[in-house]
Image (tube, coloured by chain):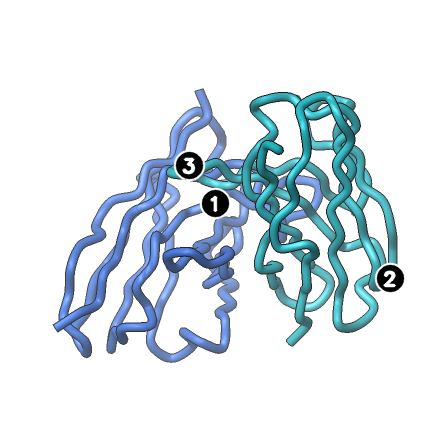
Chain colours: A blue, B cyan
Amino acid sequence: QVQLVESGGGVVQPGRSLRLSCTASGFAFSSYAMHWVRQAPGRGPEWVAVVSSDGRDKYYADSVRGRFTVSRDNSLNTLYLQMNSLRPEDTAVFYCARGFEITPDTFDVWGQGTLVTVSS
Amino acid sequence: EIVMTQSPVTLSVSPGERATLSCRASQNISGHLAWYHQKPGQAPRLLIYGASTRATGIPARFSGGGSGTEFTLTISSLQSEDFAFYYCQQYNDWITFGQGTRLEIK
């Protein structure tokens, strides 16, 4: 079935780096834009970044631009998020999500999420 | 940044009754609005896109309406599985979410 599985979360000190991965299965990964969306405890979701289906185009939320980098490897059906210079306010569950085919800036398939905690 | 404001913060409704949730955009977003629901410990699920089109597999008791800056999500006859958090999301200018409405059992 259609599935996204994130990994790579954990506890990290402020200023350090972390890389998240998201492995897709059950659909043609290379045909879809892919997003990262995060959700801090008790808050609504916050869009983080998107990468086009071919990996060429990337866009970021203001809150992470210059610190986070999104990428993908279509040969491995995997999406990545490299997070540098992490801050306590980056603490959240990070979800990868598929861009819906009809409206690519909405999200029709989500992973289960991976928790990132930034704390000293 | 377009700010999405949802109301009420919490809505208490009895099973079988109708619930209406509201979402307001800080500027005109045309019909570029989606709704999601989320149960504790789970990822959000897409309910509505284009302000009024149900996503695949979403029951007909869910309906969305509105355009411009004012939007509603109506659940016509609440089932037990509908009690959850609901979020609106605009995609007219970048992507932003509302802060959510908690729909709880009365």
Chain containing mark 1: A
Query: In the rendered image, which residue does mark 1 sit on?
Result: A97
Crowdedness near tag 2: few (<14), some (14–19) or many (≥20) residues, C-alpha within 10 Å: some
Instruction: Give the image quarter of residue A89.
Output: bottom left
Tell which tag, 3 or 1, sits nearer the viewer: 3
Q: Residue furthest front?
A: B106
Instruction: Give the image quarter of residue B83.
Output: top right
Query: In the rendered image, which residue does mark 3 sit on?
Result: B42
Q: Nearer the viewer, residue A10 or B78?
A: B78
Query: In the rendered image, which residue does mark 2 sit on?
Result: B68
Q: Which residue is located at x 38 percent, y 38 percent?
A: B41
Amino acid tagged 3: Gln
Name above or below for residue B67 compared with residue A24.
below
Chain containing mark 2: B
Q: Secondary structure at mark 1?
A: strand
Chain containing mark 3: B
Name above or below for residue B59 compared with residue A74.
above
Q: Secondary structure at mark 3?
A: loop
Instruction: Give the image quarter of residue B77.
Output: top right
Relative image position of residue A47 (x, y in whole percent): 51, 60
Q: Nearer the viewer, residue A119 or A35?
A: A119
Crowdedness near tag 1: few (<14), some (14–19) or many (≥20) residues, C-alpha within 10 Å: many
The quarter of the image holding the N terminus of chain B is bottom right
Q: A95 left or right of B89?
A: left
Q: Nearer the viewer, residue B29 or B37?
A: B37
Relative image position of residue B45 (x, y in whole percent): 55, 36
Amino acid tagged 2: Gly
The quarter of the image holding the C terminus of chain B is top right
Crowdedness near tag 3: few (<14), some (14–19) or many (≥20) residues, C-alpha within 10 Å: few
Amino acid tagged 1: Ala
